[in-house]
Amino acid sequence: MLFRLDSSLTVKSNTSSFIGTSFFLPSSERLYSAFRRLEKEGFISSYWGDEEAGARRRYYTITDKGRTAYEENRAEWDELKLLIDEMIAPQGEEEKNTKKKRGILG
């Protein structure tokens, strides 16, 4: 996964396909701050592009350490989401929803 950040509009167009909506779009300053922190911690790496025209752009890619952290955090999120879904499901739907999410029902 490679991200190019030259404006929040570019990030918006790239992320809307991932999350289905762009209602939550942090400012460019917050994105750069988060990217710097992630790079400092070794979760992503970056390099400057060598564009012939226009402004120079910085490109970001996830590292092996970042992919591992993502997978671990994603698994934790999936479990938490399952618990929350079970708590807010209508009475009697909890077991059906749990089985469906775990692949027991089609």
Image (spheres, helix red, strand yellow):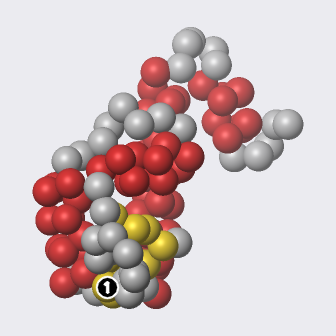
The residue wearing badge 1 is 48
In-front residue for pair 15/10: 10
Instruction: Identify which amino acid the numbered label 1 is placed on.
Output: Trp
Q: Quadrant of residue 48?
A: bottom left
Residue at 48% in and 73% down: 2
The quadrant of the rendering that contains the C terminus is top right
Residue 72 percent coordinates (x, y)? 45, 69
Residue at 33% in and 87% down: 47
Residue at 52% in and 29% down: 86
Residue 65 percent coordinates (x, y)? 40, 85
Residue at 52% in and 72% down: 1
In the rendered image, is residue 86 in sight? yes
In the rendered image, is residue 79 in sight? no
Relative to 38, does residue 84 appear above or below in the rendering? above
Relative to 96, does residue 18 appear above or below in the rendering? below
**Most distant residue in the front direction:** 53
